[in-house]
Image: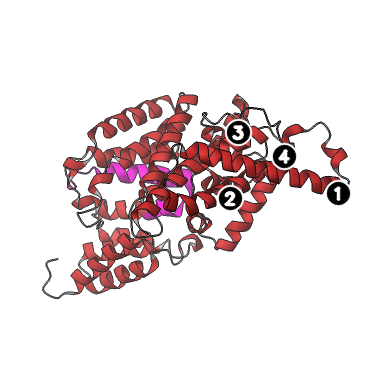
Amino acid sequence: MDAPERIVEDLLRELAPQVLGVLARRFGDFATAEDAVQEALLAAATQWPVDGLPDNPRGWLVQVGYRRMIELVRAEAARRDREDRAARRAGDDRRTAPAADEPLTADRDDTLVLLFLCCHPTLSTASAIALTLRAVGGLSTAEIARAFLVPEATMAQRISRAKQRIRASGLPFRMPDEQERQDRLAAVLHVLYLIFTEGHTASLGADLRRVDLSEEAIRLTRATHALLPDDSEVGGLLALMLLTDARAAARTGPSGELISLADQDRGRWDAEAIAEGTTLVTRAMARGPVGPYQLQAAIAALHDEAPTAAATDWPQILALYQVLERLSGNPVVSLNRAVATAMVHGPAAGLGALAALDADPRLAGHHRLDAARAHLYEMAGDRERAVAHYRAAAGGTTSLPEQRYLTMRAARLATPDAPF
């Protein structure tokens, strides 16, 4: 992909949820609005690399999507008339094309409204998260399927059904009231967390990070925190993102190669983001109740505050992972707890903790289990097993930077005279 195409792709990913918000607010029909936006994005992806960017890219997309939306709405109205179902829609002007002289307001960012709409109460949490990752986060169906560890076809069906449920609900496109916000908040926070996670370590491709996604997740979480400043888990999630993203500049070398946390130049970490994140998590945990995002943020803060890798407070990190494991039941948390166990009690104890995860189907074949086991075998001085698991982990990841890092670790250990 050449530079103009990459610029266009990045811009379209940023603008897509904003344009979708404009059309969904204007017409009150999320599913049809997304169809119109997808056609506008396709037109832009075809024309902009050739003709150059328009003076107002967002306005261009809104106008093209708006025209297509009117076509789709009128076609749907005609179909309903032919099938003699117009009476059931009487009085519902949400599906009617607006007057030609009615102004189209495109200067408002409805992304947060869109975020809460995607976390609709009629949807399962998994469907709400998947839909929001598609509509707000801009992830492809394949990327979302990988995040959920399900086949792409299954995820495509899930997203399609979610859109149809929102269409059938008839709810207006507006920010929900206070009670509705609380009902949807857990799904909203999970969505934001997954968007950030995909941005922090991309599941596919040549780049370790997708900065557009991580920055958008932080922006949306800041907006949610401004809306709900007293919610401790919202504050905890924002803290977690800031404390994690603070290390981003040191995670890659000059050639884009991955650098492990222990080997990073901590002088390149963002001290301002660390200070903000630490303040946020301290306030959130004092306010309570304590939840998973606050605990993860507290763990990130302990890593960020250590002047060197050797000075990391692993006993405290292990204690926090133990609490987090009881709260979440997440196998990835259990995997991280096993690594922390090795750092406190030695690699044999960590390997024993990992063995308990082999029977968990959610981790079956996941490259992170092999990567953790390789690291612990390396700590234990077992080169042969470490090499085998590093190679297995490299074969299981679709992230090229991770793949190169794991392959290089295996190659270094496989060299007989390499320093251990």
What crowding class fits label 3: few (fewer than 14 Cα within 10 Å), some (14-19), or many (20 or more)?
Answer: some
Q: Mark 4 or mark 1, which is nearer to you?
A: 1
Disc sitting over residue 82 in the figure: 1
Q: Mark 2 or mark 3, which is nearer to you?
A: 2
Could you tell which of marks 4 and 3 lies nearer the N-terminus?
Answer: 4
- Quadrant housing residue 394: bottom left
In the picture of the structure, the residue carrying the numbered disc 3 is: 183
Could you tell which of marks 2 and 4 lies nearer the N-terminus?
Answer: 2
Could you tell which of marks 2 and 3 lies nearer the N-terminus?
Answer: 2
Name the side, left or right, on which 272 lies relative to 17. Answer: left
The three-letter amino acid code for the residue at tag 3 is Asp
For image coordinates 45% across by 32% down, the residue present is 234
Between the C-alphas of marks 1 and 3, the distance is 39 Å
Q: Which residue range is magenta in the image?
A: 309-335
Between the C-alphas of marks 2 and 3, the distance is 33 Å
Disc sitting over residue 169 in the figure: 4
For image coordinates 62% across by 39% down, the residue present is 66
> Judging from the image, what secondary structure is the residue with disc 3 in?
helix
